[in-house]
Image: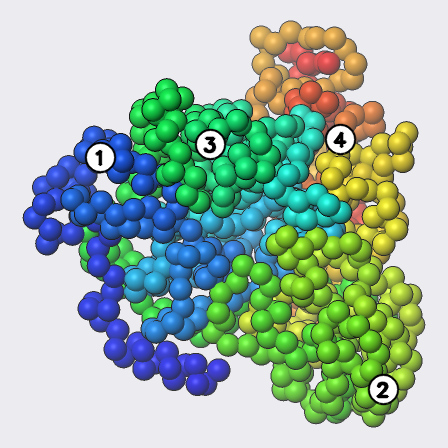
Amino acid sequence: MGRFFLILFLLCVTWSAGNARRPFACDPRNAAVKGLPFCKVNLPIDVRVRDLLSRLTLKEKLGLLVDNATAIPRLGIDEYEWWSEALHGVSNVGPGTRFGGQFPGATAFPQVITTAASFNTTLWEEIGRVVSDEARAMYNGGVAGLTYWSPNINIFRDPRWGRGQETPGEDPIVAGEYASRYVRGLQGNLPGDRLKVAACCKHYTAYDLDNWSGTDRFHFNAKVSRQEMVDTFEVPFRQCVTQGKVASVMCSYNQVNGIPTCADPRLLRDTIRGAWRLNGYIVSDCDSVGVFYDKQHYTATPEEAAADAIKAGLDLDCGPFLAKHSQGAVDRGLLKETDIDSALLNTLTVQMRLGMFDGDSTAKIFGNLGPKDVCTPANQELALEAARQGIVLLKNHGPSLPLSPRRHPTVAVIGPNSDVTVTMIGNYAGIACGYTTPLQGIARYTRTIHQPGCRNVKCKNSHLFGDAMGAARQADATVLVMGLDQTIEAEFVDRNGLLLPGYQQELVSKVAAASKGPVILVLMSGGPVDVSFAEHDPRIGAIVWVGYPGQAGGTAIADVLFGTHNPGGKLPMTWYKQDYLSKVPMTTMDMRSNQARGYPGRTYRFYNGPVVYPFGHGFSYSTFVHILASAPATFTVPVDGRHKNTTAVTDTVRVTHAKCAGLSIVLQVDVKNEGSKDGSHTMLVYSTPPVGHWGPHKQLVAFSKVHVPARTQLRVPIKIHVCKFLSVVDKSGIRRIPMGQHSLHIGDVKHLLSIQSNPLGVIKS
């Protein structure tokens, strides 16, 4: 770490305006464009964009339809690569960003699934702010773009999905809240519709399968009912657009009900841009247009594919397809030049909102950011704090944790993930500022004896078990750092099972039997792991899930194990048992259970069978108690009297018929920390709707992260919007508020809320 900072200091010393990128467009030194309306910052952006469009030839326009947009020298416009990534830190996965020279790395935050476990909305937004600081600094240095195709807000629907690690988990409301907060952090909440960077919510929609049992994402047709679409898959994207004000949405590879998402006008033009009023552009996942022509054979010719995509509402193609085939589509009368203009209107508007047509970026807002603003101590401390907050204590028998340097002066550190670096940052990551491995972190507290036990996470044999068991016999405590990595779960790598790979389980059990002191199992993974054996093994005193904890993961793990940090994370996904998989094909999109065909349902909302650990599970070193100080017993939903009753099946009010503005209930909850340690507590508020409706078994309706000092009490207001969170979706995809008794749950506290409509009329159907 010290060497990195020395290099960074020397680079910063040499930083000057001469090192910064040249203006992308509208260089004041270029006489050819000086005075042209599209370069005048005092004009409205829409006027500037239309002026620029009027000056472009059709050939020039076609070169702007793809991610590696071509330069237009006669108008002083540079080439631009749209594809950059910032899932949990500036990444070099996309060609728009590169590391080296003055920017050797960037802060690598924990993988999203780990950060989601914090349930801390202010943390999510702050991470976005820091990532965009570093992105802007790298843009100023000429090594990055300003358009970042992050975050991934797909629902973690199936535990086998290799990309579940990139998401905020299985709950649509949590995913939507994460999306809006992270996007706001990235984009900057600037006045006048300006953007710090342009974020992108992906992959729209019903995309959560990469390569499973002979079906891959390029050929998958997700069959989704209207009910499931409205109730689950659309929820985070709607919130990302309507509340996060995201500048872009990416359509996915798969088909939905037989139509490629990137060619479906109902999804793109009618929903994203129409109903949700996206202020930005729609981009394809990379080569998606080519995929639905070449692999899905959706159209007979490439020209038809290009025309279908653009007319459906696609504005930008990640890949060369539209640049190659749109001219032919125009020549054949399948596409009009005005259709292309409509697409470019959206992409050019975003570039102008980013200031890319304002001349010298170093003289404008954020122009002072440079190498000194990347990998700063504050940024790296935030990465460490995010890792601490995302760690989940799954089991603590005895209790076995926290460990003590005095009682445990020697700790055996064992396992294939015990001394890893790159594994800790997961996928879609960049080059970290530096790493602290679990072994290094534990060594800061006590003397260590290290034995990997397996050469890697696949753990193909038991050749190294003897040394690991010997270390456990010598030490005062044993920490096993096991789990997965990107060879087991990743993009295009879905899992076949939920058990620990290879001989890992045998290693854990044998080391636990040999250890003379407490045994702690640390699990590094993105997806859930069936560790029922460890949960039921009395020799394993504690189990900790750390996700992929980022560059400072080792420090965070050690801080939790030794009690410097009081864990407060909660699981953002259900941990199923291995036999669950035999009942649920990954290709089945239904969320709701179907007893008639033996289908158990998905996620905590619809599956109520046996699990290893439920959604929201997580212990602390403190005991927190909830006391409901005040809550309404009844609530009346005002209904627009112009709507007449329809066929009565069950009493509900259509959300579109209710007067929803400001329609919320407020609970006052006292949270008491009865422990001896200060701690942060995640309050999860669930609702169960009246029996006989189409809703879930229970649904998260609110959550809050609160810090409560030891032996003190804090009153927390909880606001629940009735139309958004106490409604259910019927089989036709209509959102309704059920009348009757709703049961609210906060930990062990249960409260019944009776909802009724006003005398103007209950809408029934």
Q: Percent x, y for residue 45?
A: 25, 37
Relative to 74, is 4 on the left or the right? right
| Callouts 4 and 3 close, C-beta under 8 Å | no
In front here: 659 or 155?
155
Instruction: Give the amino acid at mark 1.
Output: Leu
- State the residue at coordinates (84%, 79%): 462
Which callout, 3 or 2, points at the residue further toward the start of the chain? 3
Compared to 282, does 416 lie above or below? below
Instruction: Give the amino acid at mark 4.
Output: Gly
Query: Which residue is identified by label 3?
Result: 302
Mark 3, Cα crowd under 10 Å, few <14 / some 14-19 / many 20+, is: many
Structural distance between the alpha carbons of marks 4 and 3 = 43 Å
Instruction: Give the amino acid at mark 3.
Output: Pro
Structural distance between the alpha carbons of marks 3 and 2 = 60 Å
* Disc number for residue 583: none
Mark 4, Cα crowd under 10 Å, few <14 / some 14-19 / many 20+, is: many
Query: Which residue is identified by label 4?
Result: 695
Q: Where, quadrant-wise, is the C terminus in this rendering?
A: top right
- State the residue at coordinates (53%, 27%): 299
Instruction: Give the amino acid at mark 2.
Output: Gly
Q: Is residue 680 visible to us here? A: no
Query: Which residue is identified by label 2?
Result: 466
Which callout, 4 or 3, points at the residue further toward the start of the chain? 3
Relative to 604, is 168 on the left or the right? left
* For discs 3 and 1, the disc positioned in front in the rendered view: 3
Which callout, 2 or 1, points at the residue further toward the start of the chain? 1
Structural distance between the alpha carbons of marks 3 and 1 = 24 Å
Query: Which residue is identified by label 1?
Result: 56
Mark 1, Cα crowd under 10 Å, few <14 / some 14-19 / many 20+, is: some
In front here: 192 or 112?
112
Please tell me whether mark 4 sits on a helix, a strand or a loop: loop
Structural distance between the alpha carbons of marks 2 and 1 = 71 Å
